[in-house]
Amino acid sequence: QVQLVESGGGLVQPGGSLRLSCAASGIIFRLYVVGWYRQAPGKQRELVAHITSGDITNYAESVKGRFTISRDNAKNMVYLQMSSLKPEDTAVYYCTATLATPTSTYWGQGTQVTVSS
């Protein structure tokens, strides 16, 4: 059974930092592209960042320079370090794991991040 379990969300003031973590189980983690999506109220889910099995990273323009994605294949973990947070970063953040062949995508249950004073 595949599980992706996020943690680390919460309430933070503008300009603050948070670190999200995602623990994966039930997959050969090192083979997967893993990443983070987010969905704000009334908006579509959007890609925040992902990291390939070869540690190539990709970020949404809105978070470049502020967020950093990393992975630890030994621990089956993916992280999202978020700094200089803005109110518009408020959303539910979802961890994902994707394999190209055979095609499969798994999602976590999400963790709420609220940026507010």
Image (cartoon, rainbow, N blue to C red):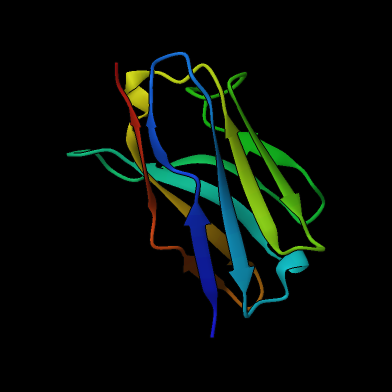
Residue 115 image offset from top left, x and y in percent: 35, 25
Q: Is residue 88 left or right of residue 62?
A: left
Q: Residue at x 52, y 47 (%)?
A: 36
Q: For this view, does 2 lie left or right of residue 27?
A: left
Q: Is residue 34 left or right of residue 31?
A: left
Q: Nearer the viewer, residue 20 or 98?
A: 20
Q: Position of residue 76 (x, y in %)?
A: 71, 64
Image quarter where the N terminus lies is: bottom right
**Quadrant of the frame with the C terminus:** top left
What x and y, as percent, mark residue 71?
73, 50
Relative to 57, is 110 above or below? below
Q: Residue at x 39, y 38 (%)?
A: 10
Numbered circles on residues, count: 0
Q: Tell me which residue sits at (62%, 18%) in the image.
A: 65
Residue sticking out furthest to the left: 42
Q: Which residue is rendered at x = 76% and y = 63% of the image?
A: 75
Residue 105 picture location, percent across and down: 52, 68
